[in-house]
Image (spheres, helix red, strand yellow):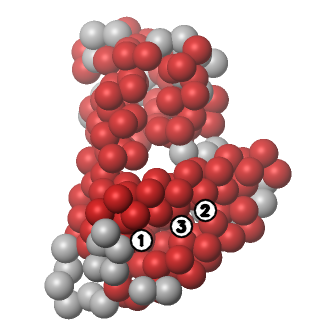
Amino acid sequence: MPKVKTSKEAVLNKVIPLIRKRGIANTSMADLAKECEIQKSHFYYYFDSKDALVKEVLATTNSYFSYNLNKVLSNSQFSISEKLKGIEHLLGKLFTNRHEGCVMANTALEAAYYNPIYFDEVAKFFDCFINGLIALLEVNYDKNEAKELAEQIVQDIEGGILLMKVYQDQRYLFNAIKRMRKLINKL
């Protein structure tokens, strides 16, 4: 029998991995309710629709990533090398404990075919990541070069996450992170 009481945060903590793994279209409200051990109707207490739930999942993911990335990058006591280690730790925490991939990239791919209403939230995630890397790269590159390199790094890491998912092998993500480190450490 499903539990009756839960919090919005508990719901989000349970649905994020399921949406990350199965995608939006392949995850029904009934699936989400089962995962959370609540009645399907209980979702509507917190979210008006599945789209509202997905937007909240993306916003929560964005908030977590942005907060932790900015915490690393804004630490004036850290060298570039220490900031890179912080970024690597964050990426590892987000992606290496599971092979589901990146909820933002997965959602962007899925939304391109089904529903582009999630693009703004997905773009915020990638903008945060790219802009954080630009800040590191602008120390030794002009703004245009720094932006190009930052975009290249994010593309490489997201590709590493995708291949990690396909082959169930973390080596792909680790290699992308290693290439990021080499590129930024050339500074």
At label 2, the amino acid type is Thr
- Residue at left offset 72%, top offset 54%: 164
Distance of label 3 from label 2 (alpha carbons): 5 Å
Asked which secondary structure carries label 3, the reply is: helix
User: Does 110 appear above or below 105?
Assistant: above
**Extreme-right residue of the structure:** 167
In-front residue for pair 173/51: 173
Q: Which mark is residue 96?
A: 2
Q: Secondary structure at mark 2?
A: loop
Q: CA distance from mark 1 to mark 3?
A: 8 Å
* CB-based contact (under 8 Å), mark 3 and mark 2: yes
Residue 33 coordinates in the image, percent (x, y): 48, 21
Choose mark 1 or mark 2, whichever is in front: 1
Contact between marks 1 and 2 (CB within 8 A): the answer is no
Number of marks in the rendered image: 3
Query: Is residue 132 in sight in this rendering?
Result: no
Identify the mark at residue 87; answer none if there is no mark.
1
Res. 43 image quadrant: top left
Q: Secondary structure at mark 1?
A: helix
Left or right: 99 in relation to 56: right
